[in-house]
Amino acid sequence: MTWPPLREELRGIEPYGAPQLDVPVQLNVNENPYGPSLACAADIATAVAGAATTLNRYPDREFVELRTALAAYLSTDTPHGVTAEQVWAANGSNEVMLQLLQAFGGPGRVALSFAPTYSMYPEYARDTVTEWVLGRRESDFSLDLARARDLVKERQPSVVLLPSPNNPTGTALPPEAVATLCEAAQDGIVVVDEAYGEFRRTGVPSAVELLPEHRNLVVSRTMSKAFAAAGLRLGYLAADPAICDAIRVVRLPYHLSAVTQAAALAALRHAPELLGKVDELRAERDASVDWLRTRGLQVADSDANFALFGTFADRHAVWQGLLDRGVLIRETGPDGWLRVSIGTADEMMAFKQALTEVLEEEAP
Ligand SMILES: *Cc1c(COP(=O)(O)O)cnc(C)c1O
């Protein structure tokens, strides 16, 4: 018997995680480069101090105040509004999506996505013993809707996972694609993972607008990216209240600590400030995409705070060359591609400088 007595399918598997290296320019996990202000931090500290005096008690397990605040925030994205009963939250949207798989996946059921897609999804499927089915995106990372619909009809997934804007490509799905797949997946749920939703280009709508028309649609969001609060661990979703209710069956008791709830509420009160850098980052993103293209590189259209670019015969050499110059990006995506998160103007200057040198030296 091998030790420890791990499930067969977990043996030898490396835990997920991008390298956390201490280098001057970190552009590898799509964080917001601008942290909360001291005023915002002080407000969070005061809120947490208030919660600390009640830590002998379990927190509100239905986190009603937080759900109400998140619903108010989401309502700015749709003329139909969002109610607190339509909102659910957990410790990061990764936990939200694991809970969705726990509730709606499981043995004998299928979870489906289209490659390239977020690398965590197959892990939620594995951990919940849900069969994982992977369709394909086209070479420009868009979806061939007729083919996607046929695959959904054929495999009848319980959960369809659609990151939009997609990670690692940055591309967003049009509302028609979401609507078509919601209809095709009648007996399952369709999760549109909008972790990067706030970064979408002008005119690209959020799937939140489609909620009234599709009771099986779930839109997932996070405070980790645009909201500049990755360290807080707060993700949430909007969906039919029946879906939120169902998740309550699988959530751990009191999964959102009083500290998390207090900090998230305080951060939400500072939403305009925390989101204040989003426009600047979008402009920096568009400029970075243009710059990479002038270098003769292919770049996927991006509605996120990162860009996928390539292609390189030896992408690892390029990644390493950048790291040697103090710039950490991500070796991810289809073969030959690399992903860079959008940082401050200074960080992007350092990235461009380093990439110029690497391309001259390595001539890949
Ligand atoms: C970063 C990211 C998330 C957010 O994860 P959290 O657990 O909320 O930090 C979710 N989905 C995708 C596709 C992401 O890239």
Image: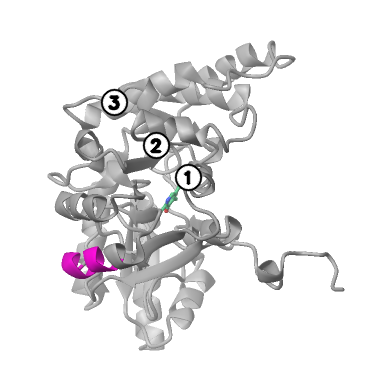
- Residue drawn at (69%, 11%) of the image: 53
Q: In the rendering, at what x and y percent does residue 92 appear? A: 51, 41
**The residue tagged with tag 2: helix, strand or loop?**
strand
Q: Amino acid at mark 3?
A: Val
Q: Amino acid at mark 2?
A: Leu
Determine whether the beta carbon of the residue marked 2 sits less than 8 angstroms from the nearest atom of ligand 1: no
* Residue 82 disc label: 3
Residue denoted by label 2: 237
Disc on the earlier residue, 1 or 2: 1
**The residue tagged with tag 1: helix, strand or loop?**
helix
Residue denoted by label 1: 100
Foreground pick, 67 / 214? 214
Asked whether the beta carbons under mark 1 and mark 2 sit within 8 Å of each other, the answer is: yes
- Residue drawn at (24%, 76%) of the image: 139
What span is in magenta?
Answer: 144-151
Determine whether the beta carbon of the residue marked 3 sits less than 8 angstroms from the nearest atom of ligand 1: no
